[in-house]
Structures are given as C-alpha cells and as structure tokens.
Amino acid sequence: RAKQLILLAARPGQGKTSLAMDIGWHVAKNLDEHVLVISLEMAIEELTERMVSSIARIDSKRLKHPHLLASLTHQEHERMALAMSQLRDSKLKINDCVGQSVSQIASLARRVKSRDGLGLLIIDYMGKIRKPEGRGFNNTNEQITHISNALKELSGELRIPVLCLHQL
C-alpha cells in the first residue's frame, strides 16, 4: 500500500533479498509499476544474475560456474536470453550504491519518481545505510529508529510503499 514502510527482517542467508527481488519483479511485470531497488550490499551484476536465474527457472549455481554454464541445454539458453531481455526492458531498476545515507536514497528515489514514476522502493538493507553526519546516537536502536522514521516519511512523501530489508 502507498505510504507504507514494510520491514523484512531475518537472519543472514534466509532469502530476504530473493524474496524482495521476487516482489519487485512481480510489481514491475504484473502490476506495470516502476520499481527501484537500492542495493547497499550486492553489486548490480550479482542481483541481475539472480533475477535472470529466477525468471528463466535455472539453478543459479549453474550460471556461476563455467563448467556448469557450459552444460546448459539449448532450451535453457533460450529461456536465459528471454529472461535477460525481459529484465532489461522491465520497469525494475537496480542501483548499487554502497554507503548511502537516507537523504541520498531519498534524493535518488525522488529523481526516479519525477522522471519515470515509482510504484515501489526496495532497500537492501537497513544496516548498511550510512548514519547522518553530526548525529550522536547512543546506541544502534536509536540509529535504527531514526532511519526507519526517515524512510516512513519518504514513503508518505512519495506516496509509495517502501520495502526495507534488515538483518537480525
């Protein structure tokens, strides 16, 4: 829903990023909305590879290793090419910007919204958002509270849902 901040939290390796990317793909492809994924941890190439694997229904391990990649069938190559084409032409955009603050993320989201429209903002992940300069936080809880409040305000300003991943 618009103006909603959704926090998706789990331990490392539980599939937060995969679930968020699947949600983003669904919104971009099936709901025809622009989706901006801001990855503060993974590179665009890694996320793109994961998306192609998911869309083409090919085990991602087979795309990572040259000897397994060479074993792809003709049908799998066709599915992979189609997936890459669909992803390239989709309304899902990935930005890998390490060390961004909430204000930098907000600025980027505003630009995308004014240029293309924006239906969903996904941030991976909260723990990697740079804390604001000159703000003395006494503990991690205060920092998380500040960041989540700022993201909630951004969600209201842009009138979009913001899905933010967090590691437990």
Image: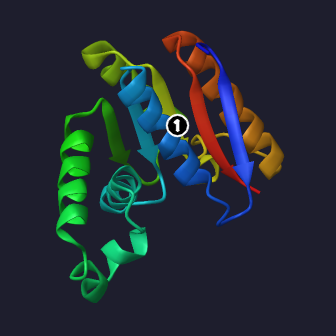
Q: Is residue 34 left or right of residue 13?
A: left
The secondary structure type at the circle numbered 1 is helix
Please identify the quarter of the rendering in which residue 93 is found: top left
> Which residue: 59% across, 34% down?
163
> Which residue: 62% across, 18% down?
153
Q: In which quarter of the image is the C terminus?
A: bottom right
Q: Which of 71 and 14 is in front in this view?
A: 71
Residue 154 x, y percent position in the rendering: 56, 20
Residue 4 x, y percent position in the rendering: 65, 19
Q: In this view, does 124 lie to the left or right of 8?
A: left
Residue 54 x, y percent position in the rendering: 41, 54
Q: Is residue 74 above or below residue 54?
A: below
Residue of label 1: 23
Please identify the quarter of the rendering in which residue 105 is found: top left
Q: Is residue 47 left or right of residue 165?
A: left
Tell me the amino acid under the disc marked 1. Ile
Q: Is residue 161 left or right of residue 143?
A: left
Q: Is residue 83 above or below residue 73?
A: above
